[in-house]
Image: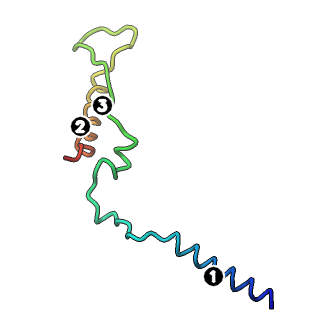
Amino acid sequence: MLNRNWKVAASVLLCGTLVACKTLEPSPVASDTTPTRALSSLCQIDAPLGYEPGAPGEADPMNELDSDATVTAIQEHNARYRAACAPSP
């Protein structure tokens, strides 16, 4: 009889702890939320890139300046970042 009482008590406690973990408010569905900087994982892990452009045709023997192609790619990346991660008003 004692074993049965322990099983019943354990079952009641287990059910009580499971109910305690349930949230009272429904969590938002991705389609119901407006993409914002706070919700976007891209905006949390990405950032605008910096670069050092050289003057057109400037010699760069130590390879310290970014090439025109690199500068263009970085500018395109930064424009996409600003479009996707603009601060919410």
Q: Nearer the viewer, residue 74 or 31?
A: 31
Residue 27 on image: x %, y % = 38, 66
- Residue on which disc 3 sits: 74
Q: Residue furthest bottom?
A: 1
Q: Which mark is residue 22?
A: none
Residue 89 on image: x %, y % = 19, 46
41 displayed left or right of 1: left
Q: Which mark is residue 79?
A: 2
Q: Give the CA separation, mark 1 to mark 3.
A: 60 Å
Task: Determine contact: label 3, label 2, CB under 8 Å.
Answer: no
Which sits earlier in the primary sequence, circle 2 or circle 1?
1
Q: Amino acid at mark 1?
A: Val
- Residue on which disc 1 sits: 12
Q: Residue furthest left?
A: 89
Instruction: For label 2, count other residues whose C-alpha is less than 10 Å away and answer few (under 14), some (14-19) or many (20+).
Output: few
The residue at the point 40 percent across, 9 percent down is 62
Q: Amino acid at mark 2?
A: Ala
